[in-house]
């Protein structure tokens, strides 16, 4: 079932499975790919993080269940808008479950994060109806199989929008 941008307005009042469904529909091919539009919809700039000291623009989320939203490219209000390339969400109350993710993204790989510990759940490829090309979740534990992760709360998720997969010490990223 596809939802319009108007129907996804409740995204800022939900958690868990409902939030995941709404955010993926919001990021579907039918909706805006504009960094500025997505930023304004999800939150306001967190001025605590100075532009030259950050890798992404951090937002104060409208959804109070989230601690932060990060978006790239990092645009100033005066800059020309560009398509989004990276979007991340984190919050202790988000409470995603592995089965919520695998229902939407059945192609999952468990990758050890040798950079700062834990594992990455990397979902790629994703259905062509989505504008993003991959999804990643970081879990800072030493789980070795997906079966061990069924009851773990996943509190952060990132959406990547570039076409090529690249392995790093921290897991996979998507690049040009």
Image: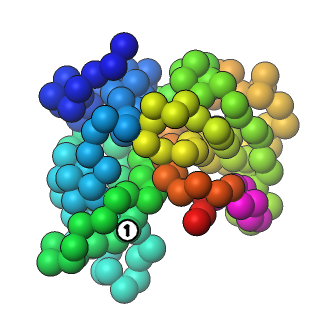
Give above or below for 55 relative to 19.
below
Callout 1 secondary element? loop
Q: How many marks?
A: 1
Where is residue 25? Give x, y as percent: 36, 29
Residue designated by label 1: 73
Q: Nearer the viewer, residue 83 or 104?
A: 83
Q: Residue furthest top?
A: 1
Q: Is residue 113 left or right of residue 63?
A: right
In the shown orientation, is residue 35 left or right of residue 62?
right
Tell me what residue is drawn at x 77 percent, y 40 percent. 110
Measured from the top left, where is residue 88 in percent x and y?
44, 51
Tell which residue pokes out farthest to the bottom in this image: 52
Q: Which image quarter: residue 64? A: top left
Q: Is residue 127 magenta?
A: no
Q: What segment is highlighted magenta in the picture?
A: 166-173
* Residue 117 higher or lower than 11, as above or below: below
Q: Is the C terminus in the top left, top right, bottom left or bottom right quadrant?
A: bottom right
Work out whether 40 lies above or below 134.
Answer: below
């Amino acid at each position: 079932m596809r939802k319009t941008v108007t129907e996804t307005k409740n995204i800022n009042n939900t958690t868990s499975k409902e939030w995941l469904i709404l955010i993926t529909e919001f990021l579907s091919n039918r909706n805006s790919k504009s960094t500025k539009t997505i930023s304004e919809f999800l939150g306001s700039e967190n001025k605590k993080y100075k532009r030259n000291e950050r890798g992404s623009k951090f937002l104060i989320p409208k959804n109070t269940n989230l601690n932060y939203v990060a978006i790239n490219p990092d645009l100033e209000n005066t800059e020309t808008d560009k398509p989004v390339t990276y979007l991340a969400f984190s919050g202790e109350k988000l409470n995603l479950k592995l089965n919520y993710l695998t229902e939407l993204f059945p192609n999952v790989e468990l990758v050890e994060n040798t950079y700062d510990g834990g594992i990455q759940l990397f979902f790629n490829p994703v259905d062509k109806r989505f504008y993003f090309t991959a999804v990643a979740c970081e879990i800072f534990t030493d789980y070795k199989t997906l079966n061990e992760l069924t009851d773990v709360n996943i509190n952060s998720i990132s959406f990547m929008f570039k076409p090529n997969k690249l392995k790093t010490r921290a897991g996979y990223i998507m690049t040009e």
